[in-house]
Image: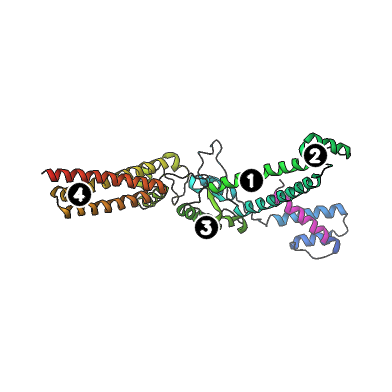
């Protein structure tokens, strides 16, 4: 790489030579001009030497500011040991951030392009299907119908027509290749549709980071973050994904030292030097979520038993209706808790609610029998 000072001197030499040849005034000092005027009869080599001296005199009074933007990665550090801020601004920084946490692995699915490609291949196969039907119709006569009954007869007929292979064989080979490609694209599109959409919390976090850091300088390349309906996440669905997100929101409201001590590890703290960016341990959050859900289920099992004990032990018609009312209320509470705290499917939610209701009915019947005996 040529130093800047050398480049500046070369440019000044060329300018001086042009100005000397055209007898134009230059921005030189008075002493230099007098020297050049007294040496107008000098040789060409002497003029060049004078020009060089003048250029050196100018360069001593000129400072060329250079704007540098370097980002060094510490040698010897593995990728896992570097924090997000250690990567250069641009795609390296964006890739480091999006790979730092599974919830930030959000990318476009390109559903529209998949649909266009599938439709294009579908119509190509339709045309090939029409060609095959037309070819079969042409051979469906008494003279050439053997071509439809035997591949060997079809190949023999092709040799009689001075063809290396039959048109049907060539067409079917093309159809086979197209079908394989079509099936592969269909299967890949189905796999992509099975990917989960990013949660509101993960999407909001990624978009905030883009607004604050602005890693890319081309708006078109950042546009993917605005296509929310076309985004998918590589994060696998966890059993309590929605509830875990709520727990993380609550953790963010805790004092920084306490949250880092309870829910982060030394390795996670090294991921980022930014005080506004925190990485929490997924396993610790899942343990806390399990503890909370277990406690809620335990309370929903004990409270209705205690609440139904007194009415059913007294006996009477009103006490039975009171117990049934308590059963209905707590069954609804259990269903709501299962729906909000877990990612249970409809049939799983129905089965769990039915089992819970059955347990409460057993308690009611036992308490009623004891009350009747008393």
Which of the two labelled residues, at mark 2 and mark 4, occupies the earlier sequence position? 2
Mark 2 closeness class: few <14, some 14–19, many ≥20 residues within 10 Å: many
Question: How far separated are the C-alphas under marks 2 and 1?
Answer: 33 Å
Residue 7 covered by magenta stretch: yes
Q: Nearer the viewer, residue 374 or 92?
A: 374
Which of the two labelled residues, at mark 4 and mark 1, occupies the earlier sequence position? 1
Mark 3 closeness class: few <14, some 14–19, many ≥20 residues within 10 Å: few
**Residue 124 in sight from this viewpoint:** yes
Q: Which mark is nearer the camera, 2 or 1?
A: 2
Which of the two labelled residues, at mark 4 and mark 3, occupies the earlier sequence position? 3
The magenta region covers: 1-18
| Relative horizontal placement of residue 63, taking residue 14 as reference (left or right) | left
Tell me where residue 76 sits by quadrant. Answer: top right
Question: How far separated are the C-alphas under marks 4 and 1?
Answer: 59 Å
Mark 1 closeness class: few <14, some 14–19, many ≥20 residues within 10 Å: some
Which residue: 17% across, 46% down? 368
Q: Helix, strand or loop at disc 4?
A: helix
Q: Which mark is nearer the camera, 4 or 1?
A: 4
User: Which residue is identified by label 2?
Assistant: 147
What percent of the width, then of the height, locates residue 37? Answer: 83, 62
Q: Helix, strand or loop at disc 1?
A: helix
């Amino acid at each position: 790489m040529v130093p800047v000072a050398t480049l500046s001197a070369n440019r000044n030499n060329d300018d001086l030579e042009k100005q000397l040849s055209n007898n134009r005034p230059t921005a030189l000092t008075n002493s230099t001009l007098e020297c050049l005027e007294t040496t107008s009869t000098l040789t060409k080599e002497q003029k060049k030497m004078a020009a060089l001296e003048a250029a050196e005199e100018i360069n001593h009074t000129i400072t060329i500011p250079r704007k540098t933007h370097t980002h060094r990665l510490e040698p010897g550090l593995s990728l896992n040991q570097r924090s997000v801020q250690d990567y250069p601004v641009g795609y390296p920084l964006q890739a480091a951030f999006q790979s730092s946490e599974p919830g930030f692995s959000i990318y476009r699915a390109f559903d529209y392009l998949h649909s266009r490609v599938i439709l294009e291949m579908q119509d190509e196969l339709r045309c090939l299907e029409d060609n095959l039907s037309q070819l079969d119709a042409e051979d469906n006569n008494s003279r050439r119908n053997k071509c439809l009954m035997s591949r060997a007869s079809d190949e023999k007929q092709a040799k009689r027509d001075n063809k290396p292979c039959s048109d049907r064989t060539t067409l079917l080979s093309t159809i086979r290749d197209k079908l394989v490609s079509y099936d592969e694209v269909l299967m890949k599109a189905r796999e992509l549709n099975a990917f989960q959409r990013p949660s509101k919390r993960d999407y909001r976090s990624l978009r905030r980071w883009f607004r604050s850091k602005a890693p890319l300088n081309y708006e078109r390349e950042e546009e993917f973050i605005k296509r929310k309906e076309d985004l998918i996440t590589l994060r696998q669905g966890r059993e309590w994904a929605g509830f875990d997100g709520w727990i993380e929101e609550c953790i963010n409201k805790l004092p920084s030292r306490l949250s880092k001590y309870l829910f982060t590890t030394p390795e996670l703290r090294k991921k980022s030097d930014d005080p506004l960016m925190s990485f929490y341990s997924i396993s610790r959050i899942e343990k806390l979520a399990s503890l909370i859900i277990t406690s809620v289920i335990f309370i929903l099992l004990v409270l209705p038993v205690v609440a139904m004990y007194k009415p059913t032990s007294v006996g009477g018609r009103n006490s039975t209706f009171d117990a049934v009312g308590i059963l209905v209320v707590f069954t609804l509470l259990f269903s709501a808790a299962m729906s909000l705290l877990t990612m249970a499917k409809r049939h799983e939610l129905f089965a769990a609610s039915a089992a819970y209701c059955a347990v409460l009915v057993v308690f009611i019947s036992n308490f009623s029998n004891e009350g009747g005996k008393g």
